[in-house]
Amino acid sequence: MSEVHVLTTGEAARYCGVNFRTVIRWIERGQLKAYKLPGRGDHRICVEDFVGFLRDNAMPVPAELGSATRKVLLVSTAPELAGCRSLLQQASVEVEIAGDSFSAGALLATSKPAMLVLDTSLEGLNGFQVLDCVRSRSDFSALSVLVIAPAGEVNPQRWLDAGADAVVAANCDRNELVGRINLLLDA
């Protein structure tokens, strides 16, 4: 099965039930993010941006496009967190796992996940720096971030203030973690 990453204005128009010129107007007004191809200047729309546009405007998301936004990058080396992968895959979530910040950065750029699950107890990783980096870049503006706070964390609010969308304790139940991930993906 080939995976669709970009749409033409005509394809986007068919999904919305409008004329392709309407899609071009949305792009020109800055309502729908797109890029132009060299030469003729045809527009191409990333599926993730299109799905975000549909959700922002309370429009239905086609099933074949909705699955493209259910990608999670899990940054952790804890075996119990890696065990969540099978539970997430059963819930139709595509999961990538990175064991260090370098791999995480590379996967963020290439796989374009909808969510980052950040285990802050990872050695050599400063979770606040990662949050600052992610929130300062416009290409990650739609990325949801779930922080797994270190054991004994007394103030989880500081992670939310730093840019996390949700915080769970490191010793939380796997089903609770998977439930929270699904809730954020569906929001």
Image: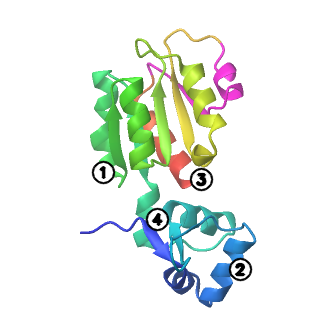
Instruction: Report the amino acid beneath label 2.
Output: Arg
For the record, the magenta segment spans 155-171
**Which residue is labeled 3 in the image?**
187
**Which residue is labeled 1 in the image?**
90
Q: Is residue 82 above or below residue 179?
A: above
Callouts 1 and 3 close, C-beta under 8 Å: no
Residue 57 falls in which quadrant of the image? Answer: bottom right
Q: What residue sits 61% from the left and 69% below the top?
A: 54
**Which residue is labeled 2 in the image?**
25
Left or right of residue 57, residue 85 in this image: left
Q: Is residue 54 above or below residue 184?
A: below
> Which numbered disc, 1 or 3, marks the residue that appears first in the sequence?
1
Categorize mark 2 by other alpha carbons within 10 Å: few (<14), some (14-19), many (20+). Answer: few
Categorize mark 1 by other alpha carbons within 10 Å: few (<14), some (14-19), many (20+). Answer: few
Q: Foreground: 45 or 16?
A: 45
Q: Position of residue 85 (x, y in %)?
A: 30, 39
Categorize mark 3 by other alpha carbons within 10 Å: few (<14), some (14-19), many (20+). Answer: few
Residue 53 falls in which quadrant of the image? Answer: bottom right
> Which numbered disc, 3 or 4, marks the residue that appears first in the sequence?
4
Q: Foreground: 140 or 54?
A: 140
Instruction: Report the amino acid beneath label 3.
Output: Ala
Distance from disc 1 to disc 3, alpha carbons, whole Å, reads 19 Å
Distance from disc 4 to disc 2, alpha carbons, whole Å, reads 24 Å
Indicate yes or no whether the magenta region holds residue 53. no
Question: Could one spot residue 74 in this view of the protein?
Answer: yes
